[in-house]
Image (tube, rainbow, N blue to C red):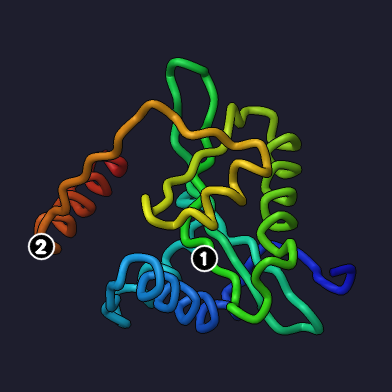
Amino acid sequence: MQDISIRLAEERDAETLIRFNTAMARETEHRALASDVVSAGVRALLKHPEYGFYVVAEKNGEMVGSLMVTPEWSDWRDGFFWWIQSVYVRPEFRRRGIYRRLYAYVKARAAEEGNICGCRLYVERENTVAQRTYEALGMRETCYKMYEESLPPEVARRLTSVSKDIEGA
């Protein structure tokens, strides 16, 4: 697909990224995202490059796929892992190398940065098609299990407020 271009997302891409994130959550996790929350989350990342960045694939000026990258510092490796998240390719463009192109762009940017020690992602256990894609591109399953505890929104807001106060002190 020579007519696919890859670029960093811009604020003008927010609405499409919101739609892609909503569709991805519905498809992969059978979750309905709250539109105001996902909208705020997408827009916050686009305004704050320190949070991460989106990479988009376009065909004829129309977005056909995207992914998000967020950094995680590794003291063991003295570098950043880039977490690939929110991967979405429109159904009619799947199995055509769109993700391969997005991932190649991410790896090229990582090489330019110089302090990126690896790329990571998580995938639903049942999503074997995606797992085969990631493996075909050189990624391997790790020995880690993932755990999570969601904080209530009011707690998360307080923690954000406290961290901003600490930064300002």
Q: Is residue 157 left or right of residue 75?
A: left
Q: Position of residue 28 (x, y in %)?
A: 39, 66
> Which residue position is annotated with label 1?
46
Q: Residue furthest top?
A: 76
**Quadrant hosting residue 119:** top right
Q: Position of residue 148 (x, y in %)?
A: 21, 45
Q: Residue at x 43, y 78 (%)?
A: 23
150 or 2: nearer the eye? Answer: 2
| Residue type for callout 1 | Leu
**Quadrant hosting residue 143:** top left
27 or 86: nearer the eye? Answer: 27
| Residue type for callout 2 | Glu
Q: Residue at x 43, y 19 (%)?
A: 75
Q: Is residue 7 above or below residue 166?
A: below
Q: Residue at x 26, y 79 (%)?
A: 34
Q: Secondary structure at mark 2?
A: helix
Quarter of the image with the N terminus in it: bottom right
43 or 4: nearer the eye? Answer: 4
Q: Position of residue 65 (x, y in %)?
A: 63, 71
Q: Is residue 149 above or below residue 42?
A: above
85 or 94: nearer the eye? Answer: 94
Quarter of the image with the C terminus in it: top left
> Which residue position is annotated with label 2?
154
Q: Secondary structure at mark 1?
A: helix
Q: Residue furthest right?
A: 2
